[in-house]
Amino acid sequence: MFQHVKDLQFDVRVSKPDPRFANLLLQQFGGGNGELKAAMQYFVQAFGCRRAYPDKYDLLMDIATEEFSHLEIVGATITLLLDGVNGALKEAAEGNLVAQLGNGDARKSDVIGMALDNPHFLVESAGGPMVTDSRGIPWSGSYVNANGDLTVDLRSNIGAESRAKIVYEYLLQFTDDPGVQDTLRFLMTREIAHFQQFTAALDAIEPNFPPGILQGDLRFTHTFYNMSPDEDARGPWNKGKGPWPKGEHWEYVEDPVEFVRETQGQTEKAIAGHERDPAMVQELERQLAIQRSQEVKEGSEAGESEMHWSASAFE
């Protein structure tokens, strides 16, 4: 269950209204890398691992709930940044909104600019946050990545936290309000913490690479194709050992066109870069399939007369 506590996780403070920055901050309210996306993504992912990975379920629910707290922080900040705009919009009898704000903290240029940048924001929200990004594009469930494989989901989450962190870093450049900057730094720093938490959770799952069960076609796993010749760059992504275990290395194909012709469209390509036994890899896939299936079955209540979700129901 959820229980709402009126106090925010971090105290939001705003020195003065700033409608234009309020509009920018919508990016982290209803944008594709915002707090609602993160909360819903982790929330949805958690359902699938409730039985098989109860510890990861707990992690995902904890962070999802914190992201909902961050959504509230962003919404509160937007509302304070619109102070004056909201009230003036309600006072239709007093006449023109811009005229009313002419001598206030919210400057005419800010209000006019926000109306031009995102008219939907002012016209339909009456000065509060909306579930859109800064351009007025509505939030979409397509932002949520949940693939049913925990190693895939955790990698998606590491990427999500990375993107959210850099958005806050960019947003910091567009405000000089000390209170708002303090709030943004808190939110940005929590993205860093979540990145590390998801990384640690992924590392706790063994094996976790490649994602899923199948190990891939051994002829192509270690091959790098030089698809953009001239001024070629070499590094650990295409040279030497790279990320592979001891005794393995990258195979570098200098001329992919000629290589494809020589190998009959790569149907006759030999294994290179490693000496893994295909039969042993096939057995690994079989054992991994059994392991993953058993993890799910151990947490399943299928066959029982009545199934329960809450742990207290089992006592």
Image (cartoon, rainbow, N blue to C red):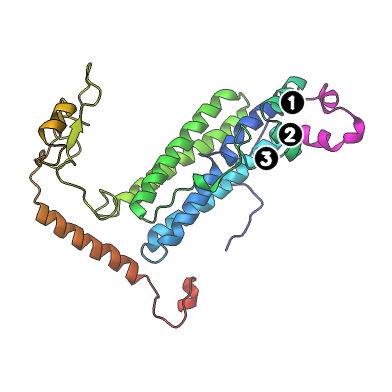
Please tell me whether residue 163 is drawn above or below residue 107 in the rendered image.
below
Compared across the picture, whether 16 is left or right of 48 comes to right
Q: Which amino acid does label 3 sit on?
A: Pro
Task: Tell me the residue that label 1 is attached to.
Answer: 111
Q: Residue farthest to the top?
A: 231
Residue sitting at 47 percent across and 52 percent down? 42
Compared across the picture, whether 76 is left or right of 49 comes to right
Question: Looking at the image, which is closer to me, 258 or 116?
Answer: 258
- Relative image position of residue 220 (x, y in whole percent): 18, 41
Choose the circle earlier in sequence order: 3 or 2: 2
> Is most of the magenta stretch helix, strand or loop?
helix
Q: Is residue 93 magenta?
A: yes
Q: Within 10 angstroms of label 2, few (less than 14), some, or many (20 or more) residues?
A: many
Q: Quadrant of residue 297?
A: bottom left
Q: Which amino acid does label 2 sit on?
A: Leu
Task: Tell me the residue that label 2 is attached to.
Answer: 122
Q: Disc count in the image?
A: 3
- Relative image position of residue 246 (x, y in whole percent): 11, 41
Task: Tell me the residue that label 3 is attached to.
Answer: 129
Mark 1–mark 3 Cα distance, whole angstroms, equals 15 Å
Q: Does the magenta stretch include residue 307?
A: no
